[in-house]
Amino acid sequence: MANILDEIVAHKRIEVESAKARVPQSELEAQVPDSAKPRNFFAAVTRASSTVNVIAEVKRASPSAGLIRPDFDPVAIAKMYHENGAAAISCLTDAKYFQGELGFIDRIKSAVPLPVLRKDFIIDPYQLYESRVHGADAVLLIAECLNEGELVDLLILATQLQLTTLLEVHDVDSLLRVRPHVGFPHRGYSLLGINNRDLRTMTTDLNHTLRLLDLVEDTRHLVSESGIRTHDDVHRLQRAGVNIVLVGEHLMKQDDPGEALRKLIHG
C-alpha cells in the first residue's frame, strides 16, 4: 500500500487528459454562467452550534477498505445524513480507487438541501470547472498532491467559481507550507483540513489532529478528517477546539448510516 497517493495522482493525470479530449475546458467554461449558484458550504460547516458540525461522506469503496457498502445508494444515504443532522455532504467522485462518479453530486443535490463537497484528487484547473458545472459547492485540495504555485492558482480559480475549498494536509511540512494560504484569496471560501489518514500508506491515527493543533492559527475553520468513530472521539476534538469533522468510512460500514451519524453527534 506504500506510495498509493503517488499511484492515484499519476492515474488522475491520465484521467484528466482523457476528460479534456472528450469535453474541452472551453465547453465547461461556457456552461458555468448557466449553472446554479453554489450553496454556501463554508457557512454551513462553520455555523455556531452546540453540537459538532459533521461533513458526512458518501463513499462506496476505498483503497484501504476495499468495497465498503455493496448496497450503495448515494441519494438514500444523503437523505439519511440530512435527516440526522449533517451540516454538509462529502461525495467521493474518483472512479478507479473509490468507485465514485461525478454524477452522484447532481443526484444528491436534487434530493437534499445540504451543500456538497467534491472529494477527489484535484490537480488541474479543468477539474474545478468540471466540479462547478456538475453542481459541487466545494472542492478538496490536497497539499501533498500540489506544489505551491499549483495550489495558489487553484485557490484563486475556485474562489472565482464561488467554490469553497477544503485545503487538506497530513504532514507537518505541508501544514507549514500552506498555512499562509489558508483563507486566500477570500477568507469566507477556505477551510483547513487535517487528514488523520496518511494517504501514502492509508494508516490512520485520530491523535494526528491533536498533535498539529499548536500549528493551526484558527481552529474555528479547521476540519478533522478520518478515524472518527465515536461520540467520545468527537468530544475529544471539541475539547481541543475542533468543531468540524469529516466522517465517511465509519458511517458507511453501519447498517443505518443515519442512526450512526445521530449517535456520533449526540452520543
Image: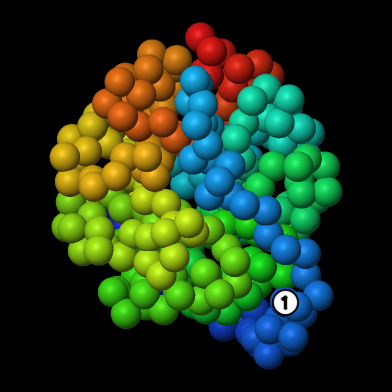
Can residue 23 be seen here? The reply is: no
Q: Amino acid at mark 1?
A: Val
Task: Name the residue: 50% across, 31% down.
Answer: 48
Q: Position of residue 174 (x, y in %)?
A: 23, 59
Q: In the image shown, does 24 or 29 lie closer to the viewer?
A: 29
Can residue 40 be seen here? The reply is: yes
Task: Name the residue: 37% across, 72% down.
Answer: 151
Q: Position of residue 253 (x, y in %)?
A: 58, 26
Q: Is 260 located above or below residue 220 in the figure? A: above
Labels in figure, total? 1
Q: Position of residue 84 (x, y in %)?
A: 67, 22
Q: Is 126 located above or below residue 122 in the figure? A: below
Q: Residue furthest top?
A: 267
Q: In the image shown, does 241 or 19 lie closer to the viewer?
A: 241
Q: Is 190 located above or below residue 263 in the figure? A: below
* Dot 1: element: helix
Task: Name the residue: 59% across, 22% down.
Answer: 261
Q: Is 18 located above or below residue 267 in the figure? A: below
Colour basis? rainbow
Task: Name the residue: 68% across, 30% down.
Answer: 81
Q: For label 1, count other residues whose C-alpha is less than 10 Å away and answer few (under 14), some (14-19) or many (20+).
A: some
Q: Position of residue 176 (x, y in %)?
A: 18, 58
217 vs 113, left or right, is left
211 vs 53, left or right, is left
Q: Which residue is mark 1?
A: 32
